[in-house]
Image (cartoon, rainbow, N blue to C red):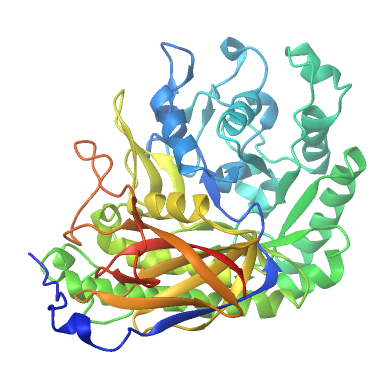
Amino acid sequence: MRRREFLASPAALMQPAPATVVVDPRPQFEISPLLYMQFMEPLGVTDSSVEAAWDYDADDWRKDFVDTTRDLGPQVLRWGGLYSRYYRWREGVGPAARRPWMRNYVWGGKETNRVGTHEFVDLCRRVSAEPLMCVNFLSDGETRYRTTKEGDRTAGAQEAADWVSYANDPSSRERRSNGVAEPYGIKLWQIGNETSYGSTTFGKDEAIAHTIKFARQMKARDRSIQLIGWGDRGREGYWARDMVDRAGEWIDMVAFHMMGQNPIRKDTVLRGLRWQKEPEQAWEELLELARRVETRLTEMEESAGPKMPIAITEGHLSVPPSNSNPILLDWLSAAYHARSLNIYQRHGARVRIATIADFEGNRWTVNALLLQVPKGASYLTPAGAVARLFRRHAGTHGLAVKSAPSGLDIAASGTGDKVFLHVVNTDYRHAVDAAFEVAGRQVNAGRVLEIAPGELRTAASAEQPEPFRAVEKAIGPVGMRWRFPAGSVSVVELETRAL
């Protein structure tokens, strides 16, 4: 189905100047250098995930995977998820031939443990990302992992603290015995993952008590590490306020997951394949879901109190079927992902870590990066393409947008004399014209990096791996203004000087 694009006629070009994007250049807050995160978890037979990214012929990460990840540019890579409930980190270190296979209790099948601490940190270093390790937190209280057929898969505070020493203690004999002389210096660690979800995990009070015990032992090994405690809602409502009040001296951030973004409308086109015949309604529904992201984030901020930083260590669009809806490969989904990232940046005074997708694999469409298997190309989904664009073109401090044309969702940031605007044209059919003004400063020059598929039903695939690469265009030479195509996602960079 072709969409209509209403372009200005020559007569329209003679009309009054377009509405103006007005930016206040005064820094509002520092944007976290850890804001853009990706989340890696071995997923067994559900999605080949980590195994799909490993080249057994070369006994190394796939080169195409590393290159695409470096292009994506995540600032943080997280290891863990539900997998951490039964992960024993020592099984993933030492000579690869001696590492035991393990059963993947949540996602099915078995894992080789060919990728463990050493390989994961190596990947992070190759792509210039900080590693974040999610520890086995007594299996988040799930007692079934104490008595599996393969033995006890739970792990306590001592094992978590030993992992910190293995990674960070310069004199660790255990790490040195495995051929690594220099410490890894892993600074980010998460205690608890989705601990409040369901009825089989810890209750709030028990989880807080164990968090304090874990934190004490882990920080006793390295006082410089940053710990993330679990604070999302569960049987007792949000945990964050009590977690902060009672364990706040031990944790540096509180974690939430932006999950469960299911269709709202009873007549939704997001179930099944109706969206393919009614893409404009799908676009509007996805924008509605993005508005719910801000509502949920505001709840998180209130529950965590006024000072505790927030880490959204998992988050993706949950439209059915679970984790594999093909709309997530289609540019239609960019409306949700770009607006979500703008929301996180605008709330950057509190949000220090965030993600809009899982990281990589070969089956799930909720990933930012997909791989052909057993070999072939790696490519970015719309979520990955938007994250790449915004991550690579952003300032160090959040700025306020004082006014903007209707239809444009904008998050502003700045570094020195340069202003960055992350712009989403939320209008499915119409281009939006805008002029640019930075209060108290003169705009000397500008450029736009624009993702504007000619058809909003454009999809990423192995046959078309790069349909969402941003195109750079200069603004001008007459006037600081731009026409944002319907459904486009752009970054505007403005060079300014004081008046």
Q: Residue at x 61, y 39 (%)?
A: 129
In the image, residue 98 above or below residue 283: above
Query: Is residue 237 in sight in this rendering?
Result: no
- Where residue 199 sits, quadrant-wise, is bottom right
Tell me: residue 83, above or below residue 234: above
- Kindly identify the residue that appears in the image at 8 percent across and 65 percent down: 2
Place residue 96 in its image quadrant: top right
Is 239 located above or below residue 173 in the figure? Answer: below
Q: Position of residue 355 (x, y in %)?
A: 52, 56
Q: Nearer the viewer, residue 50 or 223?
A: 223
- Dividing the picture into quadrants, the one containing residue 217 is top right
Q: Give the number of callouts.
A: 0
The x and y percentages for residue 450 are 34, 57
In the image as oriented, which residue stretches furthest toward the bottom?
16
Residue at 89 percent across and 38 percent down: it is: 221
Position of the C terminus by quadrant: bottom right
Q: Is residue 349 visible?
A: yes
Q: Residue furthest left?
A: 1
Image-based side of 278 in relation to 70, left or right: left
Residue 87 percent across, percent down from the top left: 62, 36
Residue at 67 percent of width and 42 percent of height: 133
What percent of the width, then of the height, locates residue 47?
37, 39
For the N terminus, the quadrant is bottom left
Q: Is residue 311 left or right of residue 179?
A: left
